Amino acid sequence: MLEYHHQRARALLANAEEIFDEAAVQQAVRNVAHTLNNRFEDDDEFPLVLGVMGGAVVFTGNLLPQLTFPLEFDYIHVSRYGDEDRGGEIVWKVVPRSNVEGRVVIVVDDILDEGETLAHVKQRLLDMGAREVILAVFADKAIGKAKPVQPDIVGLTIPNRFVVGFGMDAYGYWRNLPGLWALNNEDLSNG
């Protein structure tokens, strides 16, 4: 069984196309950091940065050391159950341990796809009393239709394809790639 999973993981990349290499990915992270640093460098308020687990762990880990202002870090974990392509119930597995009331909260996520989950996260944080919620996403997928929420800061805009790398996965594989790879739809349907 383990051998099957190893073969499956390697097969996903066999026909994949690298759409952003490591240099482009790292430049995107620097750009996001620069935008946040400009916003908060002279601010007396220390924002709360919330990483969305598990996809944002790589982006968050690369971003935090480049931020030059005092901040508090915490994380959240939300999942969708049911039909992930057409909604489904959003469940908070981990809520912020830090107090969000009256604070500026920066939500760091790997990708804005359809936008339902991040729209829910933003609204819930506002309902919890956050003064402002800033959505910083590594990748904004160009899906060709309106989304219920727009990111405030975007690292890269990616095509409407299934991508892996830099925290994004397929079947749990390839979050560790330093670049972004678009997978072949046939390879995904054969999984």
Image (cartoon, rainbow, N blue to C red):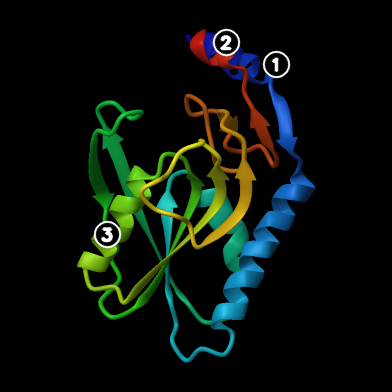
Marks 3, 1: nearer the viewer: 3
Q: What amino acid is labelled 3 in the image?
A: Gln
Eyeballing the image, is 181 above or below 106?
above
Q: Residue at x 48, y 57 (%)?
A: 151
Circle number at residue 186: 2
x and y, in percent, of residue 184 in the image = 62, 17
The residues bearing labels 1 and 2 have C-alpha atoms spaced at a distance of: 9 Å
Q: Which residue is mark 1?
A: 15
The answer to whether 2 appears left or right of 122 in the picture is right
x and y, in percent, of residue 27 in the image = 74, 56
Q: What amino acid is labelled 2 in the image?
A: Glu
The residues bearing labels 3 and 1 have C-alpha atoms spaced at a distance of: 39 Å
SS for dot 1: loop
Q: Residue at x 23, y 43 (%)?
A: 91
Q: Residues within 10 Å of mark 1 (few under 14, many from 20)?
A: some
Among the two numbered marks 3 and 2 on one chain, the one whose residue lies closer to the N terminus: 3
Residue 191 shows up from this direction: no
Q: Which residue is mark 3?
A: 123
